[in-house]
Structure formats: structure tokens, C-alpha cells
Amino acid sequence: MTSIGLPVVAPIARARRRLDLAGRTFTALSGFASLLIVLMVAVIVGEIAWNGWATVSWEFLAGAPREGMTKGGIFPAIYGTVLLVVLMIVALIPFGVGAAVWLHLYARQDAWFTKAVRFAVHNLAGVPSIVFGLFGLGFFIQFVGRGMDRAMGLDVMWGQPALLWAALTLALLNLPVVIVTTEEALGTVAREQREASLALGATRWQTVRHVLLPQALPGMLTGAILAVARGAGEVAPILFTGAAYYLPFLPKAPTDQFMELGYHVFVLATQSPDVDATRPLLYGTVLVLLVLTFLLNLTAVLLRARLRARLLGKG
Amino acid sequence: MTVTPLTSRRNAARARLRAREGVIELLLRACAFGAVAGLVLIVLFVFKEAWPIVADPEVQKESSLRGYFATPLWQPVGAVPKYGLMPLLTGTLKVVLIALVFAVPLAVLAAVYSAEFAPARVRETLKPVIELLAGIPSVVMGFFALMVLASWLQALTGAAMRLNALTAGIALGLGILPTIFTVSEDALRSVPRSFREASLGLGATPWQTAWHVSLPAASAGVAAGCLLGLARAVGETMIVLMASGNAAIHSASPFDSVRTLAASIAAELAEVVVGSPHYATLFFLGALLFSVTFVINLVAGLFVGRLRKRLAGT
């Protein structure tokens, strides 16, 4: 046994050692990559929090920029961001939820129109944000806005960058987010409940209103919050559709331009004549923007986790 | 047979209800149509504004398809404007390549770790951290690259220009990392448990199982993740606009400043006259970006379809 065993076992043991080494290296490397990502995120967030912390005060949040944006606060940018996002949501939610309800409950899944809608949703999500900016300028401002001005005999009222056009551009950008999350949420409502409602004689719309939508609410909220987080952070689509470098007054009408947090970061970081003077303001603004988007994303993640838990509990 | 007033009233109510249902269904269908209309309008209006490039002789005197490749320079605001696309194309390619080289190994390895090796508790930490990274607005990533990363990299490489392709590429890589990770990890985790159990049962080690079984089974999904990352990288604007230096230099060195297609649009469109050759050219760049990302996304969709078929077919 030993006479034939030894020469065979030795190479196997050697091969196994090699295997083990390769395996350990591979496993360690994958763990190391994960660790590296976590570290990089920690560095980015830490750097911003560390340098921005001292700037954020009540005066900073509630004050207006002063002395060529080297002093003062960012209230107009916060105000503009909130206004922009609220307008976007008002335009977006009915369309997004309506489309999702139709896709989930009304559409024949193999019809060409249904396929076209799904194809459009899927591809809309992949369009670069700067292209949305171009579209906003070409369609909303040049085509719709100018058209309205001509029709009403105005000089230039609608045909220029404005809060309304920026909000509509962002709404289109976020349409896929809302449709996909709402449809997912509708899918978590048990089929039996839907069928019970229909069997009791409720119409399709009554079923949607009183059974599906109330139960899918957390999921729809997730979609809306994700859209808000993305809307508050996207700068490229609003570059030419309404964001202003600096405004001495707050926007009052949908045709006004507005200041926005993300755009304000861009302006402070790249257009400032005195980089050292603006640095604290810049870090403060970035921190505010980051905290805002994180809180929104966190809320969405928690809501979604609850929704998934409910789904699993049923399954 | 006589109809009693009661049933006639009930019938009328039912007819009203049915009419209302019809109107509501129509409205909902219109909402769904909104998505299709949105995509069609984007194509229509971006291409429409770029159309003078091929159709208007006045515009073509200054910028035309042939001119884009005849001049090696991008100087749209000189006394004699030059619209050579080559520096922008090579610049975009350079930054995107650096981003992929940086992000793909990290994201795919981390996805393998998360799906195959990580204890549940570690995975529950890793995934939210990556979602956190995905939630960082691109303007914030651009800011970080501009203010912090650029200085560190310059100290490390001794590059003459602080803002260069390397800085922008790495920041861009950080931006697309969550996309690649999420799609790859989803694909790996959708590999049926029986595959792994069979492999482990035959005596393979966990890493052999990951390398020889799970990864090949999920390869279409990993490829889709990389493609989606690529599409995002090509179209990403703010990170590159802030971190790349924006000089249209035609070179292969990662330490030179670069100007990308998306950043050119963002930097120049605010100052151009509507309808001018420059304006049409920038919309042409937009149409190009749209077409490229559209095709990449289509291919990624095919890969996802193949993954589903492969995992369902066995």
C-alpha cells in the first residue's frame, strides 16, 4: 500500500497546497476589495463631515449669500431645492403611479403597447442626465415655452429657463424610478385580496383605490423618496433649464429662475474668484446636500425593508 | 314585460359606473403612454436641434460631419471656430477606460465576496455602505475629486496637471461602482443553491465553487452590470466636468487634462446662441451620447435576458 501510495500522495498534497494558496488569495482579495470600498466611502463622508461641520450653523442655513458668495448662508439654495423637488413630485407622482397601476392591473402583458411602455421605461432610465438637460432646453423652453409666448403675444415669459421647466425635466428623469418601485409595491399585495375584492363585485378601479393603493403605499412612498433624493442631487438636467448662479431674491412664480444646492456646490467649487475664502462655505454646502440625500435614501431603504419583510411574512 | 322604475334607476347607475371605469382606464393608459411619449420626444427634440449639421448649408459652412473628423482641434470659441471631435472622443474613451479599470475589479470582487463568502452580518453592512455610495450626488463626488482626490493623486504621481484624466477616471469609477456591484451581486445570488451544493458536495472548495460554478453561471449578469456601468460612465457629466481639467488635449497620457463629450455640453451650452453652428454641434454631441448609451443599454438588456433563461432552463 505504502509502496504505491507515497509517490501518488505527494503530488496530490502539493497540488492541494497550491490550490489552498490560490483559494485563500482569491478569497482574501475579494474581502480586501470590499474593505477598500467601505474605507473609500468612509474617507469621502468623513472628509466632508469633518471639514463641513464647523460651518453649518443657523445663520448658514437661514442666511443669504453675501460679499460675492464668500460669506453668508445658503438659504436661497435650500429654498430653491425644496421648491424644485415639490413641483417635480406634484408633476411626477400621478403619472408614475397611474402608469404603474395600468401596467400591473390593466395591461395585457403580451400586447405590443405594453411591451412598448416597458421598453420605454427601461431605456428612459438609461438616458444620460445631460441629455435630459438638452431635452429640457430644446423641448420645454424652445418649443413649449416659446410657443406659449407666441400664442399669448408675450415677449419672453415662458420661453426662458425657469423653475417649472427644470421641475418637469427632473420629473421625466425620475419617471422610471417611480413606475418601477410602484409596480413592485403593487406586486406585494396578495393576489387573494385583489380577487376577493373583484369577486365581491367591486369594479377594477374600486379595487385599485380601496385595496391595492392603500396597501402599496409604503412602496410608492419609497419610489417618491428615491425620486426626491435623486432630484435634489442631479445638477446636469437643470444647468440650462432654470438654475441660477446667484439671485438676490427668492423665486415666487414658476417662471422664475432659482438657486439650487447641487448647482451651488458646482458654482462655489469651480467659479469662485477666491477659493480659500469660499472653502468653508463650500464644505458646509456639500455637507448639507449630503445629509439631505442620505436621510432621504435611508428612509427609502428602511421603508423598502419593511415592505420586503411583509412580503416574506406572507410567502 | 314592464320595467319597474327601481331597476331602471339601478341600470342607469350601473351604466354611469361603467362609463367612469372606462374613463379611468383611459386616463391610466394615457399615463403609461407618457413614458413612451417621453422617450420619443427626447429622441425627436435632441436630434431635431442637431439636424442643421446635416441639412443647413449655412451651419455646415462652420460645422459639418466631415469637419468633425477633418480638424484635430476642438476650439469652438476661437476667431475661426474649430469643431474637431477627435480630442473629445479620445478624451471620453480615456476617462471611461480608467474608470472601468478602477471600478470593475473592485466591484466584481466585492460582489463575489458579498454573494459567496461573506457572513450574513458582514453582508448586511457592506450592502448599505454601497447604497450610501450610490446615493452620493455626482456633484458631491466631483467636488471631492476636485478638492481632495486631485491633490492626493498629484502627490502620488507627480503629474504636472492637478486635474487630469486619472483624477476624473477614478472619481468616475467611484460613481459607477455601485451599479456594477449591485447588478453583479444580484446575478450571483440568483444562481440556484443546488449549483453550489452540487459543487461543494463533489469536494470543491468554496472558492473553486465561486470561481468555476457561480461566476460562470452568473457571467451574463456580471457582464450586464459592467455594461450598465459603462453606459453610466459615458454619460456622466458633473464628476468629469469638475475633475478632468476640461482641456481638449489629444493625447494618450492619463496625466493630461481631458475634455469629454458630456462635459463639453455642460460647459459650453449656457453661452451659445440658440440655432448657431455651435448650438447644433452641442446637440449633435448629445445625440451621439444618447445613441451610444442606448445601444449599450440594449446589449445589457440582452445579457440580462440570457441570464434569466440560463438560470431558469436548468
Image: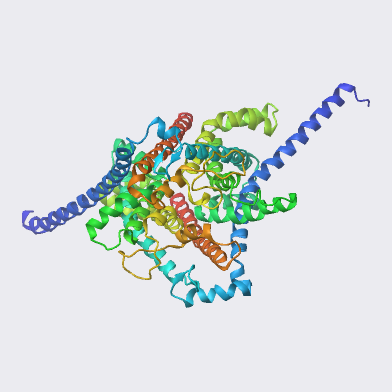
Viewer can see residue B39 = yes
Residue that sits furthest to the right in the current view: B1
Q: Tell me how the rendering is colored.
A: rainbow
Q: Residue at x 22, y 48 (%)?
A: A28
In the image, residue B135 above or below residue A56: below
Location of the N terminus of chain B (image quadrant): top right
Please state the horizontal and vertical placement of residue B308, each as a whole percent of the image: 47, 51
In the image, residue A299 above or below residue B313: above
Please state the horizontal and vertical placement of residue B52, each as a whole percent of the image: 61, 69
Please state the horizontal and vertical placement of residue A309, each as a whole percent of the image: 44, 31
Horizontal arrangement in the rendering, residue A124 relative to residue B191 (left or right)? right
Q: Quadrant of residue B88?
A: bottom left
Total numbered circles? 0
Please state the horizontal and vertical placement of residue A30, each as a whole percent of the image: 27, 49
Q: Residue at x 50, y 71 (%)?
A: B81
Horizontal arrangement in the rendering, residue B106 relative to residue A19 (left or right)? right
Residue that sits furthest to the front in the current view: A67
Residue that sits furthest to the left in the current view: A3
Between residue B50 and residue A260, name the one nearer to us. A260
Horizontal arrangement in the rendering, residue A170 relative to residue A159 (left or right)? left
Q: Quadrant of residue B168?
A: bottom left
Viewer can see residue A111 = no
Between residue A191 and residue A138, name the one nearer to us. A138
